[in-house]
Amino acid sequence: MNDYLWLEVDGLEVDVLTGVYSEETHLPQPLRISMRARLAMADHYAPTTPLSASKSYMDLKYAATDGLPRDVHFVLIESVADHIIDTIFRQDAKVEAVEVKIVKLAIAEANEAIGITMQRTRA
């Protein structure tokens, strides 16, 4: 049996230049981004276990905020998710898998969650 540690950032709201339709392409639109990164779990986490035995969840937040280029128009939110996943994999070789969920807030009419979930495992 394998044990895993999932680091998570849930419900981060970020303005990203994305969209297919002309009304979406000139201004950033709000996205709700949630991320999970899977790492192999240590045998034990003692009170003095250093951060190097895990990963900072702030790295995940960075991948969806400052790690996204502001001057690039991502036609598809799939491209946004792909960029976030690549960034997280580049940050740390301990990351085995990443899952990114993106909800397009601007197109919701009744507070529904419309978007995608992308998951990739390191090859």
Image: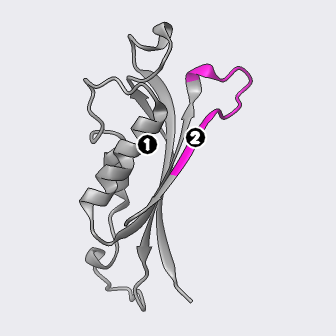
Residue name at image x 31 percent, y 79 percent: 53
Q: Quadrant of the N terminus?
A: bottom right
- At horizontal 56% and vertical 46% (from top left) the residue drawn is 117
Amino acid under label 2? Ile
Please provide percent x and percent y for residue 10.
Answer: 52, 50
SS for callout 1 = helix
- For residue 81, the mark is 1
Q: Residue furthest right?
A: 110
Q: On the picture, is 65 further left or further right than 37?
A: left
Report the magenta residues as a range: 106-118
Q: Is residue 109 above or below residue 80?
A: above
Residue at the far front: name it.
123
Residue 51 percent location from the top left of the image: 29, 74
Farthest residue in the top direction?
A: 22
Numbered mark located on residue 116 in the image: 2
Quadrant hosting residue 80: top left
Q: Is residue 59 left or right of residue 19?
A: left
Real-space CA distance between mark 2 and mark 1, rounded to the nearest whole angstrom: 9 Å
Residue drawn at 25 percent across, 59 percent down: 91
Q: Are marks 2 and 1 in contact (CB under 8 Å)?
A: yes
- Could you tell me which residue is drawn at 41 percent across and 13 percent down? 25
